[in-house]
Image: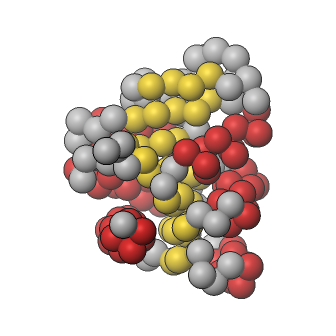
Amino acid sequence: MPKLIIGVMGAGEKATALDIKNAYELGKLIADRGWVLLTGGRKAGVMDAASKGAKASDGLTIGILPGKDTTDISEAVDLAIITDLGNARNNINVLTAKVVIACGMGAGTASEVALAIKNGKKVILLTEDISSKEFFTNLSPENVLIANNARDAIALVRQIVAQSN
C-alpha cells in the first residue's frame, strides 16, 4: 500500500511568523503519523518550515521544485522533483497530495487551493485570513474545511482519510 502523501502549501518569502510556526508543527505531526510531507521544496517560508518540522520527527519529505535545478532547495527535502515549470508545478503539488493543507494565504497558495478544488481534492485552510476562508468555503463548501491550529488540521486529515477508505 502506498504511503499517504499530505501537501502543505503556503507562502515563501511573505510567510508570517504564525504561518512558519504552524507549518513546522504540521510537518512534525505529519511525520509523527508516518505520512509523507509534500511541499514546494524551496528554502523559504512555509515550505522550509514544514520540511524542517517533518525532519525533526524523522519524516520523509518531497519537494516539487519550480526550477530546473536544486538551487534554493530546503536542506530538509529528501526527494526533490525538478520540474522547470515555475508556478505550473502547483498542479503537480495538488494532484500528488491526498489532502492539501493551506498554511497561510498568498497568490501562489490561492492558486493551489483553487486547483485542488477544481480537481475535487479536500483542502484544509489554516489561516487567519477571513476573506480567504469565506471565498473558498463559498466556492466549494463540500471540499474546503477550516482548521484553527495544526492539531485541528491533522484531525481533519484523519477524518478525510477514514472517509475515503
- The quarter in which the N terminus is drawn is top left
Among the 4 quarters of the image, the one containing residue 65: top right
Is 18 rendered above or below residue 85?
below
Is 112 rendered above or below residue 48?
below
| Residue shown at the point (44%, 51%) measured from the top left | 6
- Does residue 36 appear left or right of residue 120 in this picture? left
- Does residue 17 appear left or right of residue 30 in this picture? right
Q: Nearer the viewer, residue 164 or 20?
A: 164
The answer to whether any part of residue 164 appears in the image is yes
The answer to whether any part of residue 153 appears in the image is no
Is 29 rendered above or below residue 161?
above
Place of residue 130 in the rendered image (x, y in percent of width and height, measured from the top left): 64, 80
Place of residue 125 in the rendered image (x, y in percent of width and height, measured from the top left): 55, 69
Among the 4 quarters of the image, the one containing residue 25: bottom left
Q: Nearer the viewer, residue 45 or 60?
A: 60
| Residue shown at the point (39%, 74%) measured from the top left | 163
Place of residue 107 in the rendered image (x, y in percent of width and height, measured from the top left): 76, 55
- Does residue 2 appear left or right of residue 72 in this picture? left
Q: Nearer the viewer, residue 9 or 149?
A: 9
